[in-house]
Image (cartoon, grey):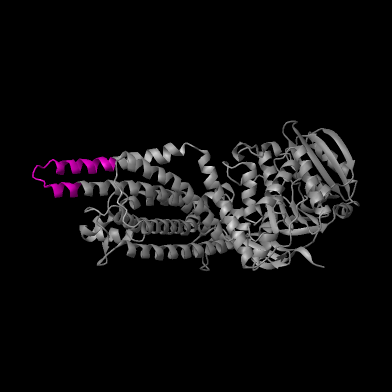
């Protein structure tokens, strides 16, 4: 071979460069590879609209019943229309975030297990990159890939269902959106190691988490409604507060649809404003990323000790 | 002298998974094992010099892959120590990982949606190879391994042989100091195996500071390629020397090869005086048994022939031959590799 390599350098800048390259390398298959299968447009952008449509029709039907009342004043009529727009917009927003949640569950949390099965994990573990760079690459690739899909759902949803957006603070909306993604993917990174430990049961866990989280996180209705339901509602809400999607969605709803039916989360005696929710999301992001780092380090130690976790068919 | 690889008294014991431990209180109050612990490596010590092409020969389950995994920092030894490129394998994992790579036969790594080029490039990025350098190397290696025409083919469309060539390219693209090759020619056709062998030999011989640890099932391959070979069985190194010296060890013995009508049992040869070791392989297609005997005393041939005839079997041919590496292996392990 004519192209040689200089002696292996060391130091912080070298490790930083190596890990950045690793992130780009691992993100690449998700960014490029996924778009080589155009069928995703139908399965992941068109089909989710059907689920969104079902909720939209219910909200529209309920609103129409109210609007038929001749005793309704103009102000009440306007409030009903604004509230319905907020609910429908919330469902479209929830549908958009669903794409990310599914990606976190099926392409982040269960990914290490999948990598083990196809024989990649051993090669990843043998490479000099940081393990967080590996997961980071998966997350960056997943976010990019899913953002394209989520944006398609959002744009089509807004156009088809005539949703009126009233963004009050675009910078805060963007900040909440990105921190929600970081916290969500951090959660996926932390789950990835656990899924690998649990092996085949990982698939069941993903299936088990999918629907309950849709419900608890309020992908299709304002999660704040749980707080008004007494005991069990508050229990569900408390659990859901630890899922970044719940808090992120609630903050975005409040800022994009400041209508009467937005029902912001009111937990622990505090009304969660977008600013408070951004703070919670930041804490969740840090906690999940730290958890991911330590879970992965523990997993690698266990794999080296037992010799079973990273090898295929073991 | 500094060694590229050094192992001292390596022991690796695999305990069975917890579910296989029978929680039965025996009279002594101890747990009983449904499946006992397995000693994969039993006090293994080797030293491989920089620039050496070192072979590891052993049957399935001999401990070859376990040894490679420990040296690649994927597994911890139970006891003992090992150094790769001067770094201790249990502590200094990152400096080791920057200097090594591994290719296993029959690997299915990578992503089917990516092209051959993209897959190899992706793995090169995990080692921090500058993208431009990686792409130049990939193109050069694609030509060398005869995979240039498949450079833009998606990996899922490659045959198993083409995939294995891609794996070899993945191993060389990071230009490691030490390369671990675990059955690298598995699944390759004759020509591709030839190209792979030649490239590996050239890579070690013509470039300074490159070391290869190779495991193979093909005796001819080990004989042709390796500077030294260690024979390993049941986790123990039985011998470690150059192929020539290994063959010289049994030169005082005589090797006989026979093809006979299929034998029902070969254990009958165990009692014949003068046989050092033997192997038997049935050829189902021809309905024959191929026998290789390593004899300490040539007079044993008469007893062997009468035993065969006693079973009602006919001898198709009998040949006295120069010892090969396979004969060395049979002499030490008591069976062939296949």
* Residue A71 drawn in magenta: yes
Dominant SS type (magenta): helix
Q: Is residue B59 left or right of residue A259?
A: right
Q: Is residue B79 left or right of residue B259?
A: left
* Above or below, B118 relative to B72: above
Please say whether residue A164 is visible from this viewpoint: yes
Residue at the image point whose x is 28% and y is 52% from the top: A257
Q: Position of residue A159 (x, y in %)?
A: 33, 40
Residue at the image point whose x is 89% and y is 43% from the top: B321
Residue at the image point whose x is 32% and y is 42% from the top: A52
Residue at the image point whose x is 81% and y is 47% from the top: B326
Q: Is residue B252 left or right of residue A69?
A: right
Q: Nearer the viewer, residue B323 or B154?
A: B154
* Residue A282 drawn in magenta: no
* Above or below, B222 relative to B21: above
Q: Position of residue A121 (x, y in %)?
A: 58, 53
Q: Nearer the viewer, residue B178 or A250?
A: A250
Q: Quadrant of residue B86?
A: bottom right
Q: Quadrant of residue B303?
A: top right
Residue lying furthest left? A71
Q: Position of residue B148 (x, y in %)?
A: 71, 39
Q: How many marks?
A: 0
Q: Nearer the viewer, residue A208 or A103?
A: A103
**Start-end of magenta stretch:** A54-80
Q: Nearer the viewer, residue A51 or B221?
A: A51
């Amino acid at each position: 071979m004519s192209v040689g390599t200089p002696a292996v350098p060391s130091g912080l800048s070298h490790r930083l460069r190596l890990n950045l390259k690793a992130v780009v390398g691992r993100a690449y298959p998700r960014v490029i590879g996924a778009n080589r299968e155009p069928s995703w447009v139908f399965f992941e952008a068109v089909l989710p609209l059907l689920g969104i449509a079902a909720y939209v029709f219910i909200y529209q039907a309920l609103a129409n019943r109210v609007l038929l009342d001749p005793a309704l004043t103009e102000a009440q009529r306007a409030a009903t229309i604004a509230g319905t727009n907020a609910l429908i917009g919330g469902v479209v927003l929830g549908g958009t975030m669903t794409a990310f949640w599914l990606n976190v569950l099926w392409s982040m949390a269960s990914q290490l297990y999948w990598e083990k099965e196809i024989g990649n994990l051993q090669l990843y573990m043998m490479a000099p990159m940081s393990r967080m760079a590996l997961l980071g690459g998966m997350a960056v690739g997943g976010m990019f890939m899913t953002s394209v899909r989520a944006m398609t759902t959002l744009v089509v949803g807004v156009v088809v269902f005539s949703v009126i957006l009233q963004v009050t603070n675009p910078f805060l909306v963007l900040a909440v959106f990105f921190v929600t993604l970081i916290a969500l993917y951090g959660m996926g990174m932390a789950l990835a190691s656990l899924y690998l430990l649990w092996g085949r049961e990982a698939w069941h866990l993903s299936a088990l988490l999918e629907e309950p989280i849709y419900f608890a996180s309020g992908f299709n209705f304002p999660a704040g409604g749980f707080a008004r339901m007494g005991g069990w509602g508050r229990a569900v809400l408390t659990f859901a507060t630890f899922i970044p999607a719940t808090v992120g969605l609630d903050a975005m709803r409040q800022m994009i649809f400041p209508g009467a039916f937005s029902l912001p989360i009111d937990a622990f005696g505090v009304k969660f404003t977008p600013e408070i929710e951004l703070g919670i999301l930041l804490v969740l992001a840090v906690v999940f990323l730290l958890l991911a780092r330590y879970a992965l380090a523990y997993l690698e130690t266990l794999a080296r000790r037992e010799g079973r976790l990273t090898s295929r068919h073991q | 002298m500094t060694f590229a690889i050094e192992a001292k008294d390596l022991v690796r014991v695999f305990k069975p998974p917890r579910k296989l431990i029978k929680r039965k209180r025996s009279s002594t109050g101890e747990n009983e094992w449904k499946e006992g612990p397995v000693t994969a490596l039993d006090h293994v010590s080797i030293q491989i010099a920089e620039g050496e092409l070192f072979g590891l020969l052993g049957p399935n389950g001999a401990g070859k892959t376990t040894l490679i995994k420990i040296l690649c920092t994927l597994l911890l030894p139970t006891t003992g120590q090992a150094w790769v490129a001067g770094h201790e394998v249990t502590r200094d994992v990152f400096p080791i990982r920057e200097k090594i790579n591994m290719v296993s036969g029959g690997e299915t790594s990578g992503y089917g949606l990516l092209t051959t080029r993209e897959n190899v490039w992706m793995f090169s990025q995990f080692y921090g190879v500058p993208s431009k350098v990686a792409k130049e190397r990939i193109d050069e290696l694609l030509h060398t391994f005869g995979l240039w025409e498949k450079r833009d083919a998606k990996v899922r469309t490659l045959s198993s042989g083409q995939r294995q060539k891609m794996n070899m390219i993945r191993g060389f693209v990071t230009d490691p100091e030490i390369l671990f090759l675990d059955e690298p020619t598995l699944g390759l056709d004759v020509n591709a195996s030839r190209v792979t062998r030649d490239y590996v030999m050239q890579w070690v011989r013509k470039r300074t500071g490159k070391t290869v640890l190779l495991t193979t099932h093909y005796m001819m391959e080990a004989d042709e390629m390796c500077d030294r070979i260690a024979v390993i069985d049941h986790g123990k190194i039985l011998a470690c020397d150059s192929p020539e010296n290994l063959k010289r060890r049994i030169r005082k013995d005589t090797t006989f090869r026979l093809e006979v009508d299929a034998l029902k049992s070969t254990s009958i040869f165990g009692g014949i005086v003068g046989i050092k070791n033997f192997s038997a392989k049935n050829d189902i297609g021809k309905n024959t048994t191929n026998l290789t005997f390593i004899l300490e005393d040539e007079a044993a041939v008469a007893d062997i022939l009468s035993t065969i005839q006693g079973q009602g079997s006919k001898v198709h041919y009998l040949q006295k031959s120069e010892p090969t590496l396979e004969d060395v292996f049979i002499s030490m392990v008591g069976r062939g590799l296949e």
